[in-house]
Image: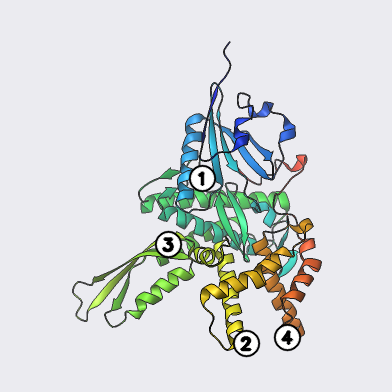
Amino acid sequence: MTARSWRLLARRSEPFLLTQPWTLPLESWDQASFVEVARGTHRHVVRFLVVGDGIYALKELPGDIARREYRLLREMAADGLPVVDVIGVVQRDELDDILVTRYLDYSLPYRHLFLTRWGQEDRRRVLGRAVGERLLDALSLLMVRMHLAGYFWGDCSLNNTLLKRDAGALAAYVVDMETGERHASLSDGQRLVDLEIAETNIAGGLMDVQAELGVEEGLDPLETAEGLRTRYDALWEELNRDEVVGTDERYLIDERIRRLNDLGFHVDEVEVVPLEGSERGKLRLRTSVTEQGHHSRRLTDLTGIRAQEGQARALLNDLASFRSWVESTTGHQLPTSAAAFRWLTEVFEPTVQAIPDTLQGKLEPVEVFIEILRHKWILSEEEGQDVGMELAVASYLDTVLPEAPDEKVIAVSEEDLDTGFIGYG
């Protein structure tokens, strides 16, 4: 009897990949190496492996599907789409292959949103319609981005998505692409099919929430799921529509670009074509958008900080406010690069460095900073004057953050394991 063999295909070197018992089924591995995190119903065996400070998802599935999903997740990441970090795929003789991805720190399964506070502005249990709307905003944006890049999901659902807090909103990440496809572009029919699948799956997921968690107030699963199409269509139209402008209205071209930038999209090309048959020199304006991330790229260029798009917008606004304050108090203009350096070293870094080690697992540092800005605004409103960052930081870290649940890793007990949080296939 010959020993089973295995072959690793990985996008980067990870030493732990070379020391695992790949010739054994996942269910036969030493359970002491695994941690239970919130996850949902799944078609395949999925385990979460702790390695140092990281957690890795291991998923068994047929070889052709595993390699295809590995390639798709890599391509999506290269295209700037929000997906889990795929590490590699282990091909095994006589056993299903294993797809390895890194667990996304501070990511939230959708059910978690119906159980915990939503941000500082409302520290009660915020359920129902408000959470449903944030979910739809995140999912519609994600699907538009995927479709623009030529990706057909084929199984969009709440279980196949992870969410991260994004300055009061949500950012959605793709977890599972087993049924996904990549094309040069998607037809209207392909986009429609993908949306119909998403609506059905989202309605089912919200029905599960109602049944399992008793969430009813303001939450109609069917009506909420139908809202995905409305949001998607509005954003798709805004990104892809042509605009007619006059030859003396070229400022409208700049306005169009700014509008798309405000939505977070980078404008790759602007095509201006004279309109046939026009007596007054009308022009047809067509913009070509690429990946989202206009504000996050700008923030990284200025400060080195990596953040979600909404977070980046909030931080850039605070940077601009800081720059205006410095210029008004000194009477001198401050170059953008100099303002960014001072804001980073005088405002942002001291704030996040003040977070105690015992509270590091609550929220991402960037999200903590943004919540402190909100907390400062609330305190200043109550006091009738600006209370300053030092007082706001101390107050927030003392009275608000300790009450927040740990979100770096959403762990679950054995009895809660099958309640359906994250699909992972």
Circle 3 or circle 2, nearest the eye: 2
- The amino acid type found where label 2 is placed reads Thr
In the rendered structure, the answer to whether residue 327 lies left or right of residue 71 reads right
Which of the 4 image quarters holds residue 113?
A: bottom right
**Disc with the residue nearer the chain's start (4 vs 2):** 2
Which residue matches tag 1?
155
Using the rendered image of the protein, determine whether residue 131 is visible from the camera's viewpoint: yes
Using the rendered image of the protein, determine whether residue 424 is visible from the camera's viewpoint: no
Residue 171 location, x and y as percent? 57, 58
- The amino acid type found where label 1 is placed reads Asp
Q: Secondary structure at mark 2?
A: helix
**Disc with the residue nearer the chain's start (1 vs 4):** 1
In the rendered structure, the answer to whether residue 298 lies left or right of residue 255 reads right
Which residue matches tag 3?
236
**Disc with the residue nearer the chain's start (3 vs 1):** 1
Residue 88 location, x and y as percent? 54, 37
Label placed on residue 329:
2
Foreground of the two, 140 or 390: 390
- The amino acid type found where label 3 is placed reads Trp
From the viewer's perspective, is residue 180 above or below residue 187? above
Callout 2: 10 Å neighbours few (<14), some, many (20+)? few
**Disc with the residue nearer the chain's start (3 vs 2):** 3
Measure how far apart labels 1 and 4 are at the Cα level.
51 Å
Q: Secondary structure at mark 1?
A: loop
Label placed on residue 385:
4
Q: Residue at x 31, y 81 (%)?
A: 249
In the rendered structure, the answer to whether residue 298 lies left or right of residue 321 reads left
Which of the 4 image quarters holds residue 218?
A: bottom right
Measure how far apart labels 3 and 4 are at the Cα level.
43 Å
Label placed on residue 330:
none
Measure how far apart labels 2 and 1 are at the Cα level.
55 Å
